Amino acid sequence: MADAADLLKTPLFDLHKELGAKMVPFAGYDMPVQYPLGVLKEHLFTRESAGLFDVSHMGQAWLVGPDHATTAAALETLVPSNMKELKPGKQRYTVLLNDNGCIIDDLMVSRPLAAEDDGRLMLVVNAACKENDYKIIAAALPDNVKLKIVEDRALIAIQGPKAAEVMALHAPEAAEMRFMEARPLEFDGISVIASRSGYTGEDGYEISIPAGAAEAIAKALLADERVEAIGLGARDSLRLEAGLCLYGHDIDENTTPVEGSITFCMQKRRKEAGDFPGGERVLKQLAEGTDTLRVGLKLEGRAPAREGAEIRAPGSEEIIGRVTSGGFAPTLGAPVAMGYVPSELAAIGTELELVVRGRALPAKVAEMPFVAQRYYRKPK
């Protein structure tokens, strides 16, 4: 475990301490795992109202080129998503791939709304992967496209069914945004960049803020009784209920987008062309299937299966897979998990066993998300 003195601190570190957070090392940062409310209540509060998350440990960067077509083409040499047709003010989830078609990291990409920002793409990458991501991206860029790493900004997320009405009090234009839209906003007179997205399955926003203004904005949101500070513990249980992958656990450099069941990140043009790292292998998997697939799992009883738990066929001693994420789902009042199983056993309803503390517990392959996603998709 990292020495506390060696850990990096986000611009909201002092506020976390003021709020009574329990701090833990995470991806090289000193981060809040929970507040006095506790993980269970934080989780349920987010589902019922609005939770505020500090995600400033994530990496923020810009790709900057002469025009959108050039910048998007450069990024498409690394990812399997259609970036050339990403419209101004829109955001897209994608993955960096290695030459085997496996996932180096997953990330969010936003195209600025303003015409004067044509040629710029905003990247948000995982904290533990950012230095490696930056190195890989920078090495692959043509001379007329540059990677500009952002060091002086914080990132927060407000998530939950009341997030939009709270945000609208400070930035009225936020209410007009739809899921996976991104735009600049004035939050109480402070210029920020917001996307209507998140990592909980709920409606909400992720907000990039000048580091010096982060505490003021966080306090303004927390002053509303509909908002509570939420730590990493509840963030993990919320994303698990939403069936969302955690990089390094549910997807990694040994899994392709097809095996990871995230082919939604690959739009039609890219699927047809296969002109991305490992494209031949990925297209073959799309056509012929894979040996293993990531699936959702529901257990009988209340004992949760944690990461690493063995997956077996009923009555068998043979290990056919392992849990990659698992825990108790507070919204459901039941344990859920995700893991990889042979493709022939990936159908919904397939009976399996998960080994928990030496006991084989009955489980079934289940649809994901485990809890319905409530993204704001109001038609235009």
Image (cartoon, grey):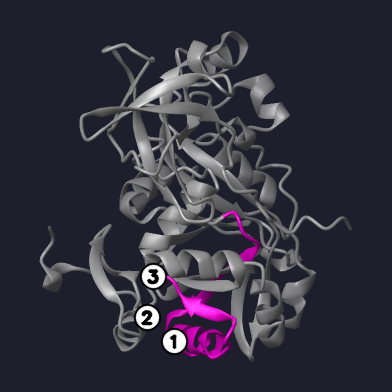
Q: Which mark is residue 215?
A: 1
The answer to whether marks 2 and 1 mark residues whose Cβ atoms lie closer than 8 Å is: yes
Q: Secondary structure at mark 1?
A: helix
Q: Of label 3 and label 2, which has the lower sequence position?
A: 2
Q: Residue at x 14, y 71 (%)?
A: 4
What separation in Å lies between label 2 and label 1 (alpha carbons)?
6 Å
Examine the image and state in which quarter residue 183 appears.
Answer: bottom right
Q: Position of residue 84 (x, y in %)?
A: 69, 42
Q: Which residues are magenta?
A: 201-230
Q: Give whichever of discs 2 and 1 has the lower sequence position.
A: 2
Residue 1, horizontal then vertical, whole percent: 12, 57
Mark 2 lies on a secondary structure that is loop
Residue corresponding to mark 3: 151
Is 253 situated above or below 379? above
Residue 227 disc label: none
Say which amino acid is labelled 3.
Answer: Glu
| Residue 171 is inside the magenta segment | no
Above or below: residue 161 compared with residue 296: below
Which residue is at the front of the view, 66 or 31? Answer: 31
Q: Which residue is mark 2?
A: 12
Q: Residue at x 35, y 56 (%)?
A: 127
